[in-house]
Image: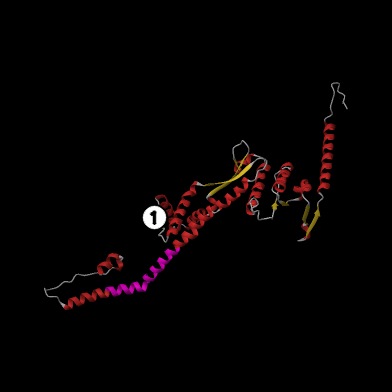
Amino acid sequence: MLRDYNRDALEYQKIAVHALQYPSTSPSPELMTEWLRSQFEQVADQIRRQRDTGLVEQREKLVLAEQQFTRSFTSNFCLRILQRVTGPDRTIDVVNKSLEDISFSGDKILMTQSLREEYSQYLDLFRAVRERTEAGPADLFSAADFEPAEAATLAALRLLLLSNDIEHSMRELNRIADYRNYKKYDFEKSSKGGDPRGLSTWGTGSGGEAETPFYIIRAAVFAASFKLFSKQKISHFRTLFLDEVFKNMDETRTRRVIDFLTKEMGFQLICAAPTKSMAALMDVFNRRISFSKAPTAGSQTWIDEVDLEQERIAEIYEEHRRNTVRDVKAKFELANPFKTDTGVAAE
């Protein structure tokens, strides 16, 4: 028993086993008693010291801490990140299904996603962890159960978790744990006879061209959420709220988008924007609610509600356009009189 104990014990825990030395061929009871007393005292001393240092209790706590660490690493790190990275896939499919039913001036839009290569190793490991935990309890930090690439990624994560360089390890772990880093999302627009173009590449176009797809995408998200294209057509709620609208769009494009949202999609549109941004579009709305606040009046706010007569506003706008064209034309002709070959101004 002592030999078995000494084989597994640490150096300072071992029991010194001395050989019995008999002076004659006859065993001596006194020597045997002394030998047993010596071994017994060493064993008793080791038991006392190990009991006093709490090694047994500490070992139990260590085993429990390791189990808790493994569970936390599995559920709060691996599986949570995996769920957040792959969770939007279903939503993207639903939104794209709605976008298939929407066409804006012949253009089609599709939402796309791509995995950043530097994060693919972590997703591979997290999927492997999920497979093993679903199969039953597993020692995740036993590399024998993983493929070589997965084991290497796991070992790197373990080094970060146990690193003494807390600042560096926390920075890296936060980067790995941020699910927003794993994929790149974009929208592709395809026109008739043209190749798809990603929204991220539209920076060369006008501000209005880049802003227009967002209203189409919002309409698709709304339609998907309320199942407006489903056979059941469960929801009758079609009010779309837009804030800070049409900032980069000219009047012609803005009216085209409004017609798309209200007439083609059938939405009731509520827009929040500065008065100057909406002044040229009052003829397409039937109600205006103005909020104003004077800087010198503390927290006092004035609210003004007006029912708009669209036909009357359209007449006023048309008259304003005619007067503007007439005035601009008159100023141009005055500054640039037409001259004949004789140098006399012609009527």
The answer to whether residue 218 is left or right of residue 119 is: right
Is residue 91 depicted above or below 16 in this figure? above
Q: Position of residue 327 (x, y in %)?
A: 84, 37
Residue beneath disc 1: 145
Is residue 117 depicted above or below 60 in this figure? above
The residue at the point 53 percent across, 51 percent down is 181
Q: Which residues are magenta?
A: 42-68
Q: Give the total number of marks visible in the rendering.
A: 1
The residue at the point 44 percent across, 61 percent down is 70
Quarter occupied by the C terminus = top right
Amino acid carrying label 1: it is Asp
Q: Residue 183 colored magenta?
A: no
The residue at the point 83 percent across, 39 percent down is 322
- Tell me the colour scheme of the image: secondary structure
Q: Position of residue 318 (x, y in %)?
A: 82, 42
Q: Position of residue 42 (x, y in %)?
A: 27, 73
The answer to whether residue 243 is left or right of residue 144 is: right
The answer to whether residue 339 is left or right of residue 21 is: right
Instruction: Kindly give the residue lying farthest to the front in the view shown.
Output: 231
- Which corner quadrant of the image does residue 235 belong to? bottom right
Quarter occupied by the N terminus = bottom left
Label 1: few (<14), some (14–19) or many (≥20) C-alpha neighbours in 10 Å: some
Q: Position of residue 157 (x, y in %)?
A: 45, 55
The secondary structure making up most of the magenta span is helix
Q: Name the one closer to the observer, 149 or 2.
A: 149
